[in-house]
Image (cartoon, grey):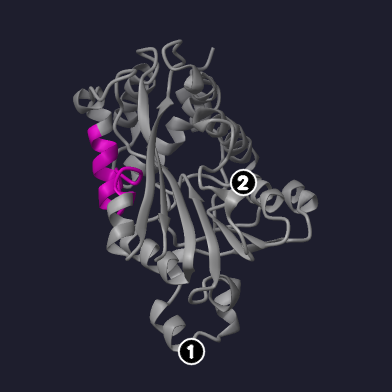
């Protein structure tokens, strides 16, 4: 029987047509994984897609879901804010099914938030229609009431620019919610790091940093928000389990999702990230096999998932 490594190495994957740092595919397999991940995250953080006080927010007229993927959270936000215009922004079109399900208050947009020219926005000179909805309509100065972003760690290679852009686009009193992962792995219920001993992990971290990605996209968000002039309202951390454990019941669904949907995609992720550093052939196969072994080695092993909520003064 073929191993995961052998099977996936022969599959052709489709990717976003973009210069963004984002390394994951954009095809039916990936969209299925994203939907499963979204459901597992909701269960992990308590049953809602967001932790901002959305039900007590008033006069909300414009909302954006940055990196909306398959549009799951966008549709949920549209239901929470039925009177608001809700934008779903991603590097490529969302699936047809999401477009067909979307209510009238949803608008889909294609683009990379990092392409926004803040200087032109402030001076009111970004009127070029080629800039698309991002500059002309979504990220206008003080034009947004709520910004939601989840699992952007593989796509944002300039976090200072990201939070500067989003902060400028929030109205006074507007809310930004950022949910993201750090790259290290820990023992269940602790902050005892397991991944410091893993060769493959050190090399993936090195590749990520070479690409400009942050390996602490979750835990660094609060300070980045403050640097952008935002007030940090709350910071909550959760265990994004890679193996289910009875010790963390809210993360059991996450562990099951990871083993069923995410782990099978790891060979492709490693091929993309380590391949950029010249790793291939037998060396890549060895590192991939070690990765798959380590990521199933201990119940409750997890990454830290941080939800940070900020407010514009």
- Taking the image as shown, residue 89 lies to the left or right of residue 283, namely right
Q: Is residue 207 left or right of residue 10?
A: left
For this rendering, which residue is in front, 120 or 224?
224
- Residue in view at x 51 percent, y 47 percent: 52
Along the line of sight, the residue nearer the viewer: 131 or 38: 38
Instruction: Give the x, y percent position of residue 14.
Output: 57, 47
- Mark 1 and mark 2: span between their CA atoms? 32 Å
Please give the name of the residue rendered at 49% of the width and 25% of the height, measured from the top-left corner: 258
- Element assignment for label 2: helix
Q: Residues within 10 Å of mark 1 (few under 14, many from 20)?
A: few
Picture coordinates of residue 2 (x, y %)? 52, 17
Residue 132 appears in the figure = yes
**Which residue is label 2 attached to?**
73
Report whether residue 255 is seen. Answer: no
- Secondary element at image label 1: loop
Residue 78, magenta (yes or no): no
Mark found first going from the N terminus, 1 or 2: 2
The residue range painted magenta reads 202-221
Does residue 122 lie above or below 16 as drawn?
A: below
The image quarter containing residue 110 is: bottom right
Pointer 1 residue:
125
Is disc 1 in contact with disc 2, using a CB cutoff of under 8 Å? no
- Residue at 26 percent across and 51 percent down: it is 210
Mark 2, other Cα within 10 Å: few <14 / some 14–19 / many ≥20:
many
Q: Nearer the viewer, residue 9 or 201?
A: 201
- The C terminus is located in which quarter? bottom left
């Amino acid at each position: 029987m073929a191993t995961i490594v052998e099977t996936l190495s022969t599959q052709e994957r489709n990717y976003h047509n973009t210069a963004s740092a984002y390394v994951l595919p954009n095809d039916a397999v990936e969209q299925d994984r994203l939907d499963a991940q979204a459901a597992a995250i909701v269960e992990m953080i308590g049953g809602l897609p967001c932790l901002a006080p959305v039900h007590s927010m008033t006069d909300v007229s414009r909302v954006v879901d940055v990196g909306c993927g398959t549009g799951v959270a966008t549709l949920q936000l549209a239901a929470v804010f039925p009177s608001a215009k809700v934008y779903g922004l991603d590097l490529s079109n969302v699936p047809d099914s999401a477009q067909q399900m979307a209510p009238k208050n949803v608008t889909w947009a294609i683009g990379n938030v990092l392409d926004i020219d803040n200087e032109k926005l402030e001076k009111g000179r970004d009127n070029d229609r080629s800039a698309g909805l991002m500059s002309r309509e979504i990220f206008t100065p003080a034009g947004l009431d709520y910004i939601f972003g989840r699992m952007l760690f593989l796509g944002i290679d300039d976090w200072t620019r990201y939070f500067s852009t989003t902060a400028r686009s929030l109205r006074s009193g507007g809310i930004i919610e950022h949910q993201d992962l750090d790259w290290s792995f820990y023992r269940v219920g602790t902050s005892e790091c397991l991944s410091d001993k893993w060769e493959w992990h050190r090399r993936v971290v090195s590749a990520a940093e070479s690409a400009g990605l942050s390996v602490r996209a979750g835990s660094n968000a609060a300070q980045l928000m403050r640097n952008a002039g935002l007030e940090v309202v709350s910071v909550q951390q959760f265990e994004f389990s890679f193996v289910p454990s009875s010790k963390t019941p809210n993360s059991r669904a996450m562990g099951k999702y990871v083993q069923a949907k995410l782990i099978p995609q790891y060979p492709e992720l490693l091929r993309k990230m380590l391949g950029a550093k010249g790793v291939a052939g037998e060396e890549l196969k060895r590192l991939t096999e070690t990765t798959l072994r380590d990521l199933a080695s201990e119940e409750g092993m997890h990454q830290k998932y941080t939800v940070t909520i900020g407010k514009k003064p």
